[in-house]
Amino acid sequence: MNPSQGLITSLNAIREASVSEGTIYHQYLPIVDDNTDIAAFGTPILNNTPVMNEFMNRLVNRIVYTSFENKYFNNPLQILEGDRIPLGYAGQEIYVNPAKGRQYDVNDFAGLLVKYEADVKVQYTSVNMDLQYPVTVSRHKLKQAFVSWDSLDNFVMELSNSLYNGAYIDEFRFTKGLVSSAYASNQVQVRTISAISSEATAKTFVQTARELFLNMQLPSTEYNAWAKVGGYGKDILTYSRPEDIVFLIRNDVRAYLDVNVLAEAFNMSKADLLGRIIPVDNFDQYDDNGTKIFDGSAIIGFIGDSSWFRIKRQDMYLDEFYNANNRTWQYYLNLTKMYNYSLFANGVVLATSAPSVDIVSMKFTDTAGLSVEADDTIELHIETTPFPANATITYSSGTVAKATVAAKEGNNKIAVVTGKAAGTSVITATAGNVTATYTITVTGE
């Protein structure tokens, strides 16, 4: 059997590198062509340790690694990856709110000296993936590879696939984990919908996704999470270009959805739509031992700007050494990346229920000593830690004859206090085992 054209190119590239660098490899190995005998080619490699080491070094570092890179940079998750971060372990994302227009006035000379502050927001990110993918190649395995050209081709492919599959599986896990962790911590906008169990519910899902797809193209504060997590200053306005919007959808949901119907709903070609759909099996999260640490069954999918995924690569390189003790070559693919999500980009999780985040601590943020007149109301505000915590808060008044209290409809982090009679009452907020108090004064009769 003759060597494949790809293998011929690869093996001759190894020899050319030896020639250009003046090493010994090319002195023992011929140029490979369609008629080269595998045994004649493999014998000088297997019978000469320095030649064998050079062959393995160049094979893995140049050929296998290049093959890995080609697959790596063409996998479907690459559309979510941003620029590299070559230095440091922390970074920052800066967002500047749109400048506010003002009415032109030819007589406004004083405006020349007015300071118009830019509304700048900053989010800090960090490198949080630093993994090694080890592969061991034994001398015996190498000998087996030289049985035929097919065996050698498969040997190269197996090495490349081993590295690629390990990296891709983890990247897939980390990527969908961003959606899971943002949902679990309530740091992303969430739209609750019915579970997909029929064509009817599937159509409702498509209608909701289409509505979001269209609305995200318009400036809005509703689809980013800056205010939701307690970001300082004004809410931010964000919008997305249609070509930047991506969809992560569970495969069991996709089974109900015809791709042509989806493409028509989003007014784009089938090919364009498929380029933006990233199918996932589920949104569960597991630890390194395979134990489920988060049940993501409530999450149906995610729709948002590709820039919501703050994924940046810092390092990707191969280390190797020969272990004479057991006659093996050890190879380590090193991959260091940043996996974060942006508070400045549009992103909505579609789920069958809202997340539940416990309150660790809370406090009333209002100035001490506020008062309310009898038969009037005042609002008191609660700040929780973490800020997006959404556990139910109940309120009680220590002296109901003086004041009553109830949570504001639609926002139980606001207590509405109604004055009853002159005096004071201690307002208590309770969430599980966490409490906060505020003494309110009632004036008048």
Image: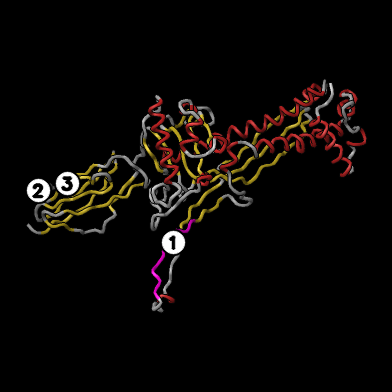
Instruction: Find out whether residue 103 is within the magenta segment.
Output: yes
Left or right of 267 in this view: 391: left
Identify which residue is drawn at 46% across, 31% down: 293
Q: Amino acid at mark 3?
A: Ser
Q: Is residue 110 above or below residue 230?
A: below
Identify which residue is drawn at 47% across, 43% down: 304
From the top left corner, tell me how far across and down residue 226 is, in percent.
Answer: 42, 50
Q: CA distance from mark 3 to mark 2?
A: 9 Å
Question: Looking at the image, is mark 1 or mark 2 earlier in the sequence?
Answer: 1
Is residue 340 visible in the rendered image? The answer is no
Magenta region, residue range: 95-105
From the top left corner, tell me how far across and down residue 147 is, in percent.
Answer: 82, 20
Q: Amino acid at mark 2?
A: Ala
Residue beneath disc 1: 119
Q: Nearer the viewer, residue 425 or 326?
A: 425
**Chosen colour scheme:** secondary structure
Left or right of 289 in this view: 440: left
Predominant secondary structure, magenta span: loop
Residue beneath disc 2: 401
Q: Is residue 296 above or below residue 84?
A: above
Q: CA distance from mark 3 to mark 1?
A: 40 Å
Q: Amino acid at mark 1?
A: Asp
Q: Nearer the viewer, mark 3 or mark 1?
A: 1
Q: Split into 4 quadrants, where in the image is the N terminus?
A: top right
Residue beneath disc 3: 397
From the top left corner, tell me how far across and down residue 14 is, in percent.
Answer: 83, 37
